[in-house]
Image (cartoon, helix red, strand yellow):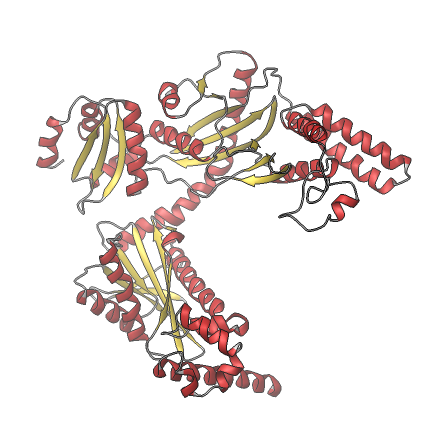
Amino acid sequence: MNDKIQEKLKLVPHLPGSYQMRDKNNIVIYVGKAKDLFRRVNSYFKGTVTGKTRKMVSEVVDFTYIVTNSETEAFITEINLIKEYNPKYNILLKDDKSYPYIEYISKPYPKVKVSRYLNIKRKDNKTIFGPYPNAYAARRIVRLINRLYPLKKCEGMPKDVCLYYHIGECLGYCQKEINEDKLKAMENEILSFLRGNDKILKDKILEKINVYAESLNYEMAKELKDELGFINYVLDKQKVELHDFVNRDVIGYYIDNGHIGINILFIRNNKLIGSVNEILTIKIDPDEELLYYIMNFYLKHEVPKEILVSKEINKSLLEDLINTDFFTPEKGIKKKLLDMSITNAKIYLENEIKTKIREEMRSEGANEELRVLLNMDNLRRIDVFDNSNLFGSFSVSGMVVFIDGKPYKKEYRKYKISVDKNDDYHTMQEVIYRRYYRMLVDNLEVPDLIIVDGGINQINACLDTLHSLNIHIKVVGLKKNDKHRTNELIDGDTYNTIAVDKDSNVFHYLTRMQDEVHRFTINYHKTLRSKGSISSILDTIEGIGNVRKKELIKKYGNITNIKNASLEELSQIIPLNVAKELKDYLIAREEDKENVHNNQKTI
């Protein structure tokens, strides 16, 4: 603990708030909240800390804090700061997970469908049921409802009735006058089933089976009999011995070996419609991370009327943040449900933890080994670059990003390069300049390490460009052996080669990064040249933007006409130098095709 921290600790107030731990680069590495800032912040530096908490504290050279009026406000502030700073010692949650819901739309025409929402928002004329983690079951139920009831099934408004009307599965909303009483009765039946009245749908299926059987349509009757068997199986399996028809979730968790296993049961209308499981790695504080997970979960998903949780969870805080009741049952069926959820969390954690630990060794563990190998103080973000030549004439580049050992695809970037063909040095200079000039202009995150897929030539190109921008970032190159396999690193500071054991986590980590950036760059090539489309080909030429591309397509229609056009004609739309580049490219492309064809004939 340095003198600065020691003096600041004395001034921290005994008030609620959020605190931020900062490293030597003034980067926020952890955000927390507390009822009493003084006690919580002092506990890190004056109490006994172990594991990842001790590692985090060893990196802290300063801290800041924001005083709030309550612990609830402190928690909200904490969540917002975590989203802003993405600290490496806070829990990282996926942003793109969603579950299917069954959605009933009443106006302008009745319709039922499966929908996915990342953020649940009640909309006019829409009633949502779920979530259904079993997407297959949700789709099959919707398909069955559409089959049994004459709902609107097509998009838009056709000029004439379609096949669904003629087979009795649509009321002909596009042309026919609809009986409002009949519509209301149909809507009531559908909503009643979705709210838990199984008998309505089962009776409807039996009625249809009898109709088909009487008309000797045994094939259709057999299909509906199979659907009835599926509905009976699903609904019998879902039954819960509760009779209050309250929508509720049950959250159980189990902590072991530095991880939290979480299980959430979804109970809707006295039925267990599904569950989800999650494993969190405990970074610092399991209670904080569990609260943060629950809060984020219900920012994205439907909030039920009641949520059952263990007594250790801060229910009053969650009730302030999430507009519902949190309850800890002591006995009865609700207690059995909570115990079942905890058991599921424990089993899931035990089954998955070995895989999770292996994954952490391949990611965070390998990242730490690489940091030690390169003798770096910190290694969180790595930018990896690869260059590739297109048809021997033009180049593209790709950049992938790894954070704490894992790919971070939101930060991936691709570049069309304007320099001459087969010029690796200037290709690298261009992509590095464009990337890190943009970093300076937009104040983007600075990586700890840059990896180039190449030797000293690419390293020098990268370093020269960084120096011209007055940026200091460590650079290393991936050196390949005779079998085109990476077996050494070239240190950009000393130009020394660093041997990498092929059986080590670092070797597999570097190989994974190399394969990822190569795949990303090659896929960009394929996108540009796929099917030889005129739009893709024009995209490869520097100086042809969207406006010029549209004008060329409008005037010439295809690549052959562009290739046959004179430079004078093309220069009426694009500059003469761009027209020459385009013609050269098309000629080279044609020659490549002819060479491939001749080689195939020879073979």
**Residue at the outermost top position:** 331
**In the rendered image of this protein, does residue 291 appear above or below residue 391?**
above
Q: Is residue 385 visible?
A: yes
Q: Position of residue 585 (x, y in %)?
A: 43, 81
Q: Give coordinates of residue 322: x percent, y percent.
A: 40, 25
**Relative depth, front residue between 427 and 228:** 228
Q: Position of residue 575 (x, y in %)?
A: 35, 80
Residue 434 point in image, percent of width and height:
28, 65
492 sits left or right of 508 in the view: left
Residue drawn at (18%, 47%), measured in percent from left and top?
25
Q: Nearer the viewer, residue 29 or 323?
A: 323
Which of these two is toward me, 553 or 19? 553
User: What is the tally of numbered marks visible in this picture?
Assistant: 0
**As drawn, 53 above or below 371:** above
Compared to residue 455, the image places residue 126 above or below, namely above
**Any part of residue 87 in sight:** no
Q: Dividing the image into 4 quarters, which one contains the C terminus?
A: bottom right
Q: Is residue 5 left or right of residue 335?
A: left
- Residue at horizontal 78 percent and vertical 40 percent from the top: 168
Q: Is residue 325 above or below residue 380?
A: above
Q: Is residue 395 left or right of residue 3?
A: right
In the picture, which quadrant includes the N terminus? Answer: top left
Q: Quadrant of residue 8?
A: top left
Q: On the image, which quarter does residue 360 sit in? A: top left
Find residue 216 and report its image quarter.
top right
